[in-house]
Amino acid sequence: MYKIATIGSHSALQIFKGAHDEGFKTIAICKKGSEKPYKMFNSADEIISLKSYKDFPKIQDKLIKENAIVIPHGSFVTYMGYEEVEKLKVDYYGNKKILKWESDRYLERQWLRNAGLKVPTLFKQPKDIDKPVIVKFMGAEGGKGYFLAKDEKDFNKKIKPYKLRKYILQEYIIGVPLFIHYFYSSLTNEIEIMGCDIRYESNVDSLGRISARDQLVFPKIDPSYVIVGNIPVVVRESFLPRLIDMGEKVVKASQKLAPPGLFGPFCLETVLTPEEEIFVFEISARIVAGTNPYVEGSPYTALKYNKPMSTGRRIAIELKNAIKGKKLGKVLG
Ligand code: ATP
């Protein structure tokens, strides 16, 4: 019997609940001190505690012996680094070759452009900045330290504390940031929209609670984008055809870049402008934490399924179907 394993963080509670719903036993790999939620919510049938996530490869043989299938999530890839993930021998859900394409901001951009999606302009050098930019550091860190700059002078002033870090200068798009969760089945070749969310970020989302006059009371108030949580959102129905189309295009483009391409859960991170343009500023090629409000399913999964369907449960169903149909090779990377 196969077991479902992942690192205890990010969307692990949802992944384990979905696994249990489909009859799998679960293994949580936790950093010492972070085990409590997985006990409190009866998530983990077994907990393996590590001093550091970097020790993950050391417990691989144990996982292999237990017939574990590892489900990657955001923290999994961030904590281990995609090169380490690529080297794993334990069964792994998803295409590992795609991780390189989402981990590098330039490759990611190439992928999105190949798919024909609209992306924000990227400025090569600070002197090129001719409209407001968001300055992002390399590696997903939940928006820590990102800042806005209006021109080269403003940039040079604000970059000082981060002098040694690698960054990109991306056009700042004014609109509503919308995160769209998809699932693409490599067994049926079908795409599904699982849900959408809006993130709540500190401090940018609290600035609107202070009037412009009162904001001036604070000598240095720069917006930051540290994620605090996710809020469910249902999009205007007339956007749906475009969103589905975008998901299909991204999958298709990935099949050329890293065969057999992207499958399983993924997310397009977008900004929707008042002109109804949709700019994609990032893609996550695995389950995102924005699916967490939908442990019991989203309005979209309610339309498609006659039972509560989270992304975690959808993954478990995919694995179950692959095992039953002797097609595990099609879902393991
Ligand atoms: P993660 O990998 O967890 O998604 P990250 O560190 O890669 O995080 P981004 O998602 O790229 O960070 O950006 C953080 C936040 O900054 C977004 O949620 C969004 O609010 C805002 N943002 C990012 N890019 C843009 C943009 N081009 N225009 C407007 N807002 C943006």
Image (cartoon, rainbow, N blue to C red):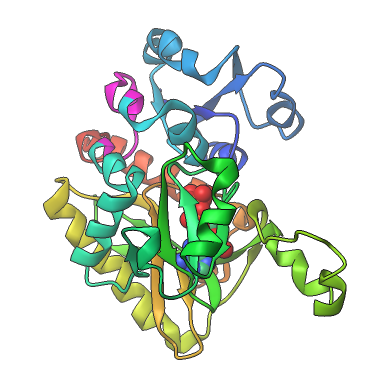
Q: Is residue 61 depicted above or below 323 in this figure?
A: above
Instruction: Looking at the picture, tell me which residue is in the foreground, 61 or 277.
Output: 277
Instruction: Looking at the picture, tell me which residue is in the foreground, 21 or 105.
Output: 105
Report x, y in % for residue 178: 52, 70
Q: Does residue 88 show up magenta in the picture?
A: yes
Report x, y in % for residue 64: 37, 14
Residue at 43%, 36% in the rendered image:
72
Report x, y in % for residue 129: 40, 68
Instruction: Looking at the picture, tell me which residue is in the foreground, 180 or 104.
Output: 104
Q: Is residue 104 visible?
A: yes
Residue 80 lies in what quarter of the image? top left
Q: Is residue 35 depicted above or below 252 in this figure?
A: above
Q: Is residue 76 left or right of residue 188?
A: right
Residue at 43%, 84% in the rendered image:
239
Report x, y in % for residue 288: 50, 50
State the extent of the magenta-drawn residues as a range: 84-96
Instruction: Looking at the picture, tell me which residue is in the foreground, 177 or 124.
Output: 124
Q: Is residue 192 depicted above or below 54 in this figure?
A: below
Quadrant of the drawing holding the N terminus: top left
Q: Is residue 42 left or right of residue 291?
A: right
Residue at 68%, 54% in the rendered image:
229
Q: Does residue 117 show up magenta in the picture?
A: no
Q: Is residue 182 visible?
A: no
Quadrant of the drawing holding the C terminus: top left
Q: Is residue 177 depicted above or below 137 in this figure?
A: below
* Number of callouts: 0
Taking the view exactly as shown, the residue that stands out farthest to the front is 153
Q: Is residue 122 left or right of residue 267?
A: left
